[in-house]
Image (cartoon, rainbow, N blue to C red):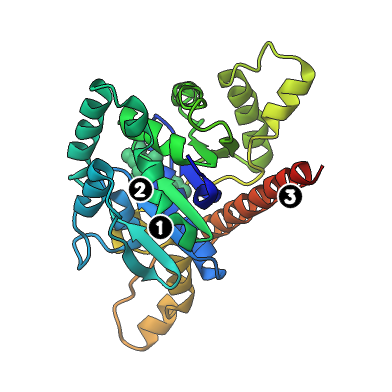
Amino acid sequence: MNRQNLQRVVAVINGKGGVGKTTIAANVGGLLALSGWRVLIVDLDYQANLGLDLGYQGKAGDDDGLALAQALAYGVRPGVLKDVRPGLDVIVGGGHIDGAAAALVSKAAQGKLDEARLSVASMLDSVAGEYDIVLLDCPPGNDMLQSAAVAAARYVLIPVKTDDGSLGGMRITAGRLEQVIDLNPDMDLLGVVVFGSGTAATTVRRESTAQIVEALGGADADEEIRTQIEGLVFESFLRHSEATAKRARGRGLLVHELDDQVKAAPKFWEQLKAGIKPQSVGPASAEGVADDLQAIAAEVVARIQAKEAESSEVAHV
Ligand SMILES: Nc1ncnc2c1ncn2[C@@H]1O[C@H](COP(=O)(O)OP(=O)(O)OP(=O)(O)O)[C@@H](O)[C@H]1O
Ligand SMILES: [Mg+2]
């Protein structure tokens, strides 16, 4: 298929749940929109947590994934929820997606495997060209949708949680990438982002890099391949802060928005002075988490630009 419109499609994926896929898709998308990029986020998850992070869940335009499910199953143009933030549009996920995934599985069983695997790519073909970046927030457990997401993506971004010592999801995800390489030979791994880490930056990087290299089969590889795999690990990572995460998701705010509110709120002594019962708007840790997400967004941009520069050089040789 012609992939001209899909050159900036990034799948945020890991077969394992709770590793920061939605948090990273929502916040990186929000920050890039703030910087003037036209951003589309596609929620491919029936849990629809993206709607919590961006605050549109249950509001006008939240169709619980119905338009997306129809677009996937029948190949029609998907409905887009416009201006969730200035410059940020969303294709809404939710409960209807499971039915669409089941329809795709039966399509595949009827001999139309490639059509099923290309369902996300075909759907995006008509809309992706209008955006500077399209982020796919992938579900943790749906094989069909994960494959279809990766088959649509120019780049793959894998968040991992290393604190629980489990990088199993990463191995499965690597296998998923191999499964669609026939359909999508240009797909490229943008990198691996360490999520929710409790340890200091340098320790995180050293320990998780070693684990990630091992998970990607690089433990026995020669020096050059090991160095290449190490280069996949993002310099930036997302620090652990449950207080910030809970407050942001609970309020439908991105972390930098929560941070802005914390900074703008009157200090507790100012509230006391004014005779108001002191209330915390949000944790002070929001600032550090917001900084981390900004660094991750900046690194996403830098990595995409480096890869685009590389491929235009190759094209000019
Ligand atoms: N910096 C952080 N520190 C600790 N917890 C966080 C942080 N950021 C987000 N969380 C929380 O971690 C949980 C998992 O994050 P998230 O939903 O982004 O992961 P996911 O990979 O999309 O999960 P799923 O596989 O269920 O879709 C959520 O409850 C989220 O609020
Ligand atoms: Mg999620």
- Whether residues under marks 2 and 1 lie with C-beta atoms below 8 angstroms apart, the answer is yes
Dot label at residue 309: 3
Q: Which residue lies furthest to the top in this view?
A: 220
Mark seen at residue 253: none
- Residue 196 can be seen in this image: no
Quadrant of image for the C terminus:
top right
For badge 3, the amino acid type reads Ala
- Residue at mark 1: 127
Q: How far apart are marks 2 and 1 (CA)?
A: 8 Å
Q: Tell which quarter ligand 2 is in.
A: top left
Q: Position of residue 283 (x, y in %)?
A: 43, 61
Dot 1 amino acid type = Val
Query: What is the x, y in percent for residue 228?
Result: 72, 28
Do the numbered discs 3 and 1 sit on residues whose CB atoms are within 8 Å?
no
Whether residue 1 is situated above or below residue 9 in the rendered picture: above
Q: Position of residue 56 (x, y in %)?
A: 27, 63
Q: Mark 2 points at which residue?
A: 123
Quadrant hosting residue 54:
bottom left
* Three-letter amino acid code at the position of disc 2: Met
Residue at x 46%, y 78% (from the top left corner): 264
